[in-house]
Image (cartoon, rainbow, N blue to C red):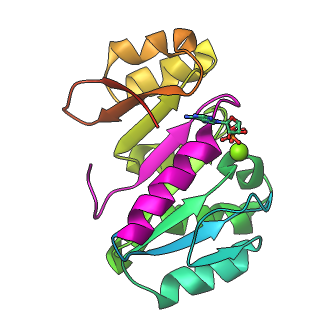
């Protein structure tokens, strides 16, 4: 799995996305990496630091280096306003210059700024609505992703650009 200068992008219907992100967080912690989590639902992520404040997350991200940053329920928060949108865009486009890797978690793709989607290099796609599967099939240039609606619970497509699709489960 790409460890640096890459944004992970997790999308799925309610089917284990936070669970999967927690496993990624544990893996990063075991490797001695800092883990910053935006956790508005206070879902008890393993982390070096958690917050429900987007402002606090941005300040922490700008002060630190080489962290895994997890943004849970990203889409639910992106609709809030221009200020929030700018913060998510910074995470998607600029945070890599601090050595960070960002995981955006969301249920649907419609409404997610294309700039964020286009900056993601890795996809964890769980069973998802047909509409979202078609959007990512085009974005990641892989027709196989259209089969995502029939994935069993907790299973996901793992996709990196220019690499074959894999079915995985944590
Ligand atoms: N791979 C898995 N194996 C076992 N249990 C899982 C797995 N993924 C999710 N679960 C369980 O399913 C429930 C929902 O998972 P969660 O990650 O909170 O869903 P989401 O974030 O998509 O709403 C949780 O109780 C979690 O423990
Ligand atoms: Mg969740």
Is 170 magenta? The answer is: no
The residue closer to the viewer here, 124 or 61, is 124
Tell me residue 72's x, y (percent): 66, 54
Query: Residue visible at 35% across and 13% down?
Result: 143
Is 14 magenta? The answer is: yes
Q: Is residue 42 left or right of residue 90?
A: right
Query: Residue visible at 79% across and 62% down?
Result: 42
Q: Which residues are magenta?
A: 1-30
Query: Residue visible at 71% across and 72% down?
Result: 54
View extreme (left): residue: 162
Is residue 94 shown to the viewer in this render?
A: no
Give the quarter of the image for residue 100: bottom left
The residue closer to the viewer here, 71 or 26, is 26
Tell me residue 123's x, y (percent): 41, 38
View extreme (bottom): residue: 63
Give the quarter of the image for residue 11: top right
Tell me residue 105's x, y (percent): 60, 47
Quadrant containing ligand 1 reads: top right
Taking 41 as reference, is 147 above or below it? above
The residue closer to the viewer here, 91 or 105, is 105
């Amino acid at each position: 799995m790409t460890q640096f200068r890459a944004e992970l992008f997790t999308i799925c219907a309610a089917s284990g996305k936070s669970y999967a992100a927690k496993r990624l967080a544990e893996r990063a912690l075991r490797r001695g990496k800092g883990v910053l989590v935006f956790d508005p639902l206070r879902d008890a992520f393993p982390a070096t630091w958690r917050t429900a404040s987007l402002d606090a997350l941005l300040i922490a991200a700008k002060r630190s280096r080489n962290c895994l940053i997890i943004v849970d329920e990203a889409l639910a928060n992106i609709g809030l306003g221009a200020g929030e949108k700018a913060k998510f865009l910074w995470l998607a486009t600029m945070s890599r210059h601090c050595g960070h890797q960002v995981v955006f978690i969301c249920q649907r793709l419609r409404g997610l700024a294309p700039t964020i989607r286009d900056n993601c290099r890795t996809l964890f796609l769980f069973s998802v609505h047909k509409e979202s599967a078609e959007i990512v099939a085009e974005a990641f240039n892989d027709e196989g992703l259209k089969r995502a609606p029939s994935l069993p619970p907790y299973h996901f497509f793992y996709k990196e650009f220019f690499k074959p699709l894999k079915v995985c489960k944590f």
